[in-house]
Amino acid sequence: MRVSISRTLSKMAHSIASGAKPCKVGDKIQDIYTPALVVDLDGLYKNLELMKTSMQKFGRVNLRPHGKAHKCPEIAKLQVAHGAVGICCQTLTEAESMVAGGIKNILVSNQVIGLPKLLRLAALARDADISVCVDDEDNLRTVSQAAENCDVKLGVVVEVNVGQDRCGVEPGKAAVSLAQVAQKLSGVEFRGIQCYNGLNQHIREAGDRKNAVALVVTKTEDTLKHFKAGGIECPLVTGGGTGTYTYEAASSIFNEVQPGSYVFMDADYGRDHGSPVHDYLHTLFVLSTVQSVTSGKRVVVDAGMKAVSLDSGEPLIISYSSDILTI
């Protein structure tokens, strides 16, 4: 028995020292080295199926999930397999990772600034259909220059400020003016507008979220009227997130939505009330081990502040017994 234990410990030590994965699919929770980031695959697949079913209600509205929630090409492939037309990325490096992982249709739903970065973005268009958001004429012209240098075509999507007061031109004529510039430039193709308000995603009451989206829809509709008056086709109207995508999709104005957190969910979405957020399961967890209990009043775990996010409040505490999770 001593030899057997010794050999087992030796194998464990060698496995850790050699950089072997701390866990694999099918391992029991109590056998995973902590702290560890773990995914409930059964719940993940349920969320993917639920989103697919949900989107079928809205006819020709496309699903383009945001990949910033996971930054993982393998999960993106699962989303595409469940009906997504492509993936949103927030950064150049995210887009590079997705293309390297086999994703062929990407919208960078943010501005990419500077010729060096835009040359890298344009290079991706040799292997995938790439679009990027713009809200400035100088940046748009640099996008065109990068595309010309790489002998590719980049899609451009004019971002419209519909209430978040972050990126985007103001609704109406400003969006049309930037689209007109895009139509005159080589190397780029005007594809539509992005109208996204991230603040709406975490409004607690479902009715209040719906009313907030109605304001977004009004500003978007007004912008589309200016496009029509200017004789410019606007094929794409994209936006929305996990907290509101059903409202944008039902508006008859949006023809693409960008929910992303639905695959994992998080504690802050858990504080929202009503659908669609409460239809989805929490599937991503930081697994930790209790290493000290003091007088029954204080519990210390092996996952410190750097292992969890506190920017939206404290994480939910979930316990388990015999592999059953309990909030």
Image (spheres, rainbow, N blue to C red):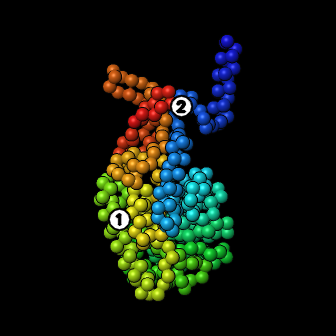
Instruction: Indicate the secondary structure of the residue bearing disc 2.
Output: helix
Instruction: Indicate the secondary structure of the residue bearing disc 1.
Output: helix
Query: Nearer the viewer's eye, disc 1 or disc 2?
Result: 1
Q: Which residue is drawn at 47% across and 57% down?
A: 54
Quarter of the C terminus within the rendering: top left
Determine the image quadrant of residue 246.
bottom left
Instruction: Note whether 90 is above or below 5 in the view shown.
Output: below
Instruction: Note whether 97 is above or below 178 in the view shown.
Output: above
Give how far across and how far down residue 164 sits, in percent: 36, 65
The residue closer to the viewer here, 107 or 81, is 81
Instruction: Note whether 254 is above or below 14 in the view shown.
Output: below
What's the amino acid at mark 1?
Val
Give how far across and how far down residue 305 sits, in percent: 42, 40
What's the amino acid at mark 2?
Ile
Give how far across and how far down residue 304 sits, in percent: 44, 36
Q: Distance between the residues labelled 1 and 2?
A: 41 Å
Q: Which residue is drawn at 59% across and 32% down?
A: 27
Question: Which residue is under mark 1?
Answer: 213
Label annotation for residue 29: 2
Q: How many labels sit on residues? A: 2
Give how far across and how far down residue 222 sits, in percent: 36, 78
